[in-house]
Amino acid sequence: MKSILGRSLGLGVKGNLEGNDIDITPKCADASITVGDEATNVRAITIQLKDANGDDIDYAEQVLITLYADAAKAAYVTTGGSTGIEIGTDGALLALVAKKVFLATSEADGDLDLTWTDTGTEAAYLALTLPNGRTIMSDALTNA
């Protein structure tokens, strides 16, 4: 790309710094969260990270997961469930605040498999904060 004066702006057509392949546009722009039915106090949670076109991303991405007491994000969960959120078969999970705030890394195909365990009935909603700052809310994780 060139300025009106004909000077190079240093940006390639695809959002890369020209000549060095440094991507300056975040690819992860959306996500889907599927909350499974309760089975013996446990719910499976599947997260698929997506690009702006709605396609699954093709690299590992880091996201922030926060648990709220309501879908409006007006209050954090009180306890975070019996054992709270745990990693399943896909991705990695690090608790920043026990049972309430997590740093998660997807697998190379953009997916995360989690479980929510609560023997009680605490209201809980999972908020997924993407690298671009967008927040995606889950359905209720609350068990009966």
Image (spheres, rainbow, N blue to C red):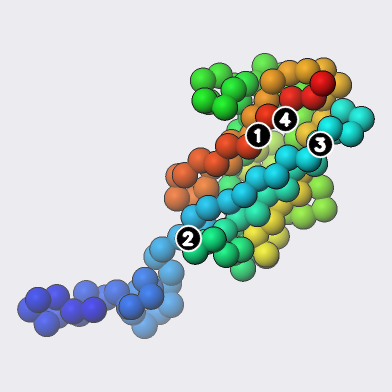
Residue 26 visible to the viewer: yes
Position of residue 50 measured from the top left corner of the image (x, y, whole percent)? 57, 58
Name which residue type carries label 4.
Leu
- Residue 87 coordinates in the image, percent (x, y): 78, 45
In this rendering, is residue 67 above or below 19?
above
Tell me if label 2 and label 4 are in contact, CB under 8 Å. no
Question: Would you say the residues marked 4 and 1 are in contact, meaning their CB atoms lie under 8 Å apart?
Answer: yes
Task: Identify the amino acid type marked 1.
Answer: Asp
Give the secondary structure at mark 2.
loop
Tell me which numbered mark, 3 or 4, is placed earlier along the sequence: 3
Alpha carbon separation for disc pair 2 and 4: 27 Å
Give residue 103's position: percent from left, percent from top. Answer: 63, 43
Residues at marks 2 and 1 touching, judged by CB atoms closer than 8 Å = no
* Image quarter of residue 10: bottom left
The residue singled out by tag 1 in the image is: 139
- The residue singled out by tag 4 in the image is 141
Q: Which residue is mark 3?
A: 37
